[in-house]
Amino acid sequence: MKKQIIIIGITILLNVVVLSGCFNSDDSNSELNKFVGTWKHGTLQDGATIKFLSNRKCTYHDNSGKWEIKDGKLVIDLTDRDITLTFDYNFLYDDQNDNQILELKEVETGHIDDYIKQ
């Protein structure tokens, strides 16, 4: 009887550990899903856009590349230009215009741009 209780206890403990890892994964996936879609520059009139795909590919101002969230930063690797851009990011919401806004601050230069979800 004691053996059965120990086996049941170990089984429950293993299930809790495995399931807690799944919940953390869901949280990071929901953060990544916020990016997916097309974002148009808020002030530039040249139609500058960023498009994030769920397969981690992207276009950034007509350049193609890959994107990821690494150490709490958005990292865009422009493969056709051999450039890597790193941004601090913040999701904002404009109540007046009912727009979702992505604020990007380039880590290297400190330059800030806003993009509106299309």
Image (cartoon, rainbow, N blue to C red):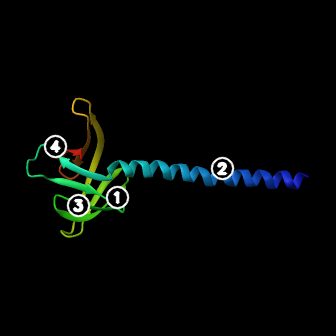
Marks 3/2: CA distance? Answer: 40 Å
Q: Callout 1: helix, strand or loop?
A: strand
* Location of mark 1 (residue): 68
Q: Furthest residue to the left? A: 45
Q: Residue at x 21, y 69 (%)?
A: 82
Q: Which residue is mark 2?
A: 16
Q: Earlier in the sequence, mark 3 or mark 4?
A: 4
Which residue is labeled 4 in the image?
42
> What residue type is disc 3 on?
Thr
Disc on the earlier residue, 3 or 2 = 2
Q: Which mark is residue 59?
A: 3
Q: Nearer the viewer, residue 41 or 99?
A: 99
Mark 1 to mark 3 CA distance (whole Å): 13 Å
Where does the image place residue 102, in percent across and percent down from the top left? 26, 44
Q: Nearer the viewer, mark 1 or mark 3?
A: 3
Which sits earlier in the primary sequence, circle 1 or circle 3? 3
The part of the image, by quadrant, that contains residue 58 is bottom left
Badges 2 and 4: C-beta atoms under 8 Å apart?
A: no
Cα distance in 3D space between marks 2 and 4 = 45 Å
Dots 3, 2 in contact, CB < 8 A:
no
Measure the C-alpha gap from mark 4 to mark 1.
22 Å
Q: x, y (%) of residue 44?
A: 10, 47
Task: Please say if the residues under marks 3 and 4 sit with CB atoms less than 8 Å apart.
Answer: no
Q: Nearer the viewer, residue 80 or 86?
A: 80
Name the element at disc 4: loop
Could you classify mark 1 by the number of other residues whose Cα lies within 10 Å: few (under 14), some (14-19), or many (20 or more)? Answer: some
